[in-house]
Image (cartoon, rainbow, N blue to C red):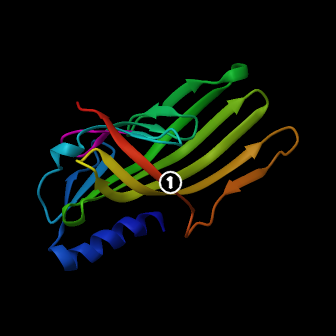
Amino acid sequence: MKRLLVLLVCGLSVFQLGGCQGLSGEKSGVEVIIEGGGGFPEFLVGVWRADKGGWEFVFEPDGTISSAVVGLGMVRMKPGEVTTVPMKMGGKGIYEPGEWVVHYIPAGRELMVRISLKNVYVKMGDSVLEGNSTDVFAGPILKDDKVWQVNWTSFPDYIARTADNPNFKISEDPDYGLSKTLIFEKVTEE
């Protein structure tokens, strides 16, 4: 389902706009798709921060994401690199990214970003959270190229282990996820 969303958007656009063009691939850990060809828009390059949820993306001139702050733990990650952070009570968090996708449709000024966390392990004291997730952010760029209004859909699949509840499943519907509205603002240019 997660990959189906990207394939569906690209597939529909092939018929409407004449094709998809991938710009970046396996080396960066981020796949970049620009509908109808062309380059990644210069006005999108830089740091974009959400009004809630802790999310942040740093877009490079080729459309790749060089780093992101993910909402779970507000941890800064780089694509293709495992991130380990110390946690309270002597624990640690280990975050392994999966495939990240950036998809831009110039005709509607629509930007879609998919961030997958392949493996997450967070230990705080005697409690552990482990699993994976995919988050999809999709919506138009507004207001002088400085605001991105998105529908954020989260597909978490985690198990929490605590003293009171040794096997608590945290997940959403695998087809629909959990959706919220976020506003990203461009905060700096790089």
| Magenta residues, start to end | 57-65
Q: Amino acid at mark 1?
A: Thr
Q: Position of residue 25 (x, y in %)?
A: 26, 50
User: Can residue 62 be seen in this snapshot?
Assistant: no
Element type at mark 1: strand
Q: Which residue is more in the foreground, 10 or 81?
A: 10
Q: Toward which corner of the image does residue 49 lie, by quadrant?
A: top left
Image spot of residue 10 (x, y percent): 28, 69
Quadrant in which the C terminus appears = top left
Q: Nearer the viewer, residue 43 or 12?
A: 43
Q: Residues within 10 Å of mark 1 (few under 14, many from 20)?
A: many
- Asked whether, in this view, residue 73 is left or right of residue 11, the answer is right
Q: Is residue 100 left or right of residue 110?
A: right
**Residue 182: in sight, yes or no?**
yes
Image location (x, y in percent) of residue 148: 34, 50
The answer to whether residue 114 is left or right of residue 187 is: right
Residue depicted at 86% across the width and 37% down the height: 163
**Residue at x-position 14% and y-position 74%:** 18
Please tell me in which quadrant of the rendered image residue 57 appears.
top left
Q: Nearer the viewer, residue 156 or 182?
A: 182
Q: Is residue 91 above or below residue 155?
A: above
- Which residue does the numbered mark 1 point to in the structure image? 134
